[in-house]
Image (cartoon, grey):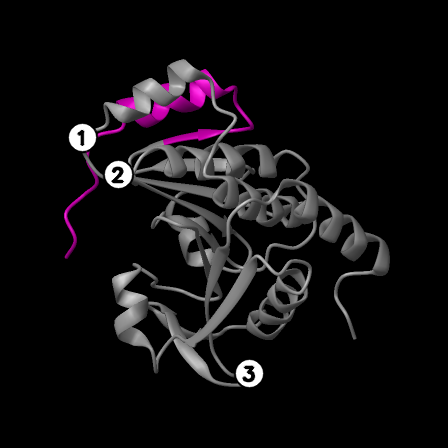
Amino acid sequence: MALLNDEVREATRKKFADEMVNPVRIIHFTQEPGRLIVLNPLAGQECFFCKETKQLLEEVAACSDKIRLEVYDFKADKLMADELGIDKIPATVIQGEKPSAVRIFGIPSGYEYTSLVEALIDVSTGETSLDPKTKEALKTIDRDVHIQVFVTPTCPYCSLAVRLAHQFALESPRIKADMIESTEFPHLANKFGVYGVPKTVVNETTSFEGAVPEDVFLANVLKAPAPPPQA
């Protein structure tokens, strides 16, 4: 049974035809249903939405010949997962002509379907709608920045924060930006005190809630200290 109904599929196909420019890769990491995998250090957890996420991406990829879907097994293709910094699944990386760290963890369903579609188009065009002053400020970043935007599928404002994060990553090679479906990764939601969404966490130290204006988003990114060293 298809996940996208006819109306959404046709709207997606038309949007891609009108707005996509260059080819885009969807690099997806998953696992077979029924297998347990350690998604956090404390307990084994099955990837409950891996099957549905893969199906959704297949249906989206079929909406444009400019989209190439590559599916990898999280364990069997560990070297590639490590290279892209993938530590949990389902995980989706969207790349265009040049590498970028536009990433989605969890199923982009509900309102977050918009985040997936917009990310594909932004990566395809290689351009963002950010203010020129924001773009200039992002060019000055001289340290690694990790933006995590926690969302739920029923949040109508979350996609606004996600798109800002993803566009920041497109403007700066020092930034990686993740959409994280908080109910699929409760250990992370608990770690960062996610009680309302969208909640954005920068370098695990600076956080703010809500779909804030672009300049406020930028100020929080710029003031965040360097990320903590990896263990």
Q: Nearer the viewer, residue 59 or 210?
A: 59
Mark 2: amino acid: Arg
Q: Nearer the viewer, residue 212 or 169?
A: 169
Magenta segment, which residues? 207-231
Dot label at residue 174: 2
Q: Residue at x 30, y 70 (%)?
A: 80
Above or below 86: residue 73: below
Mark 3: amino acid: Pro
Residue occupied by mark 3: 33
Pointer 3 or 1: first along the chain: 3
Residue occupied by mark 1: 142
Q: Is residue 30 magenta-colored?
A: no
Q: Position of residue 26 (x, y in %)?
A: 49, 60
Secondary element type, mark 2: loop
In the displayed structure image, the side of residue 112 where residue 205 appears, left or right: left
Above or below 53: residue 218: above
Above or below 33: residue 158: above
Badge 2 vs badge 1, beta-carbon distance below 8 Å = yes
Q: Position of residue 207 (x, y in %)?
A: 38, 32
Mark 1: amino acid: Asp
Q: Is residue 211 magenta-colored?
A: yes
Secondary element type, mark 3: loop
Q: Quadrant of the C terminus?
A: bottom left
Above or below 56: residue 213: above
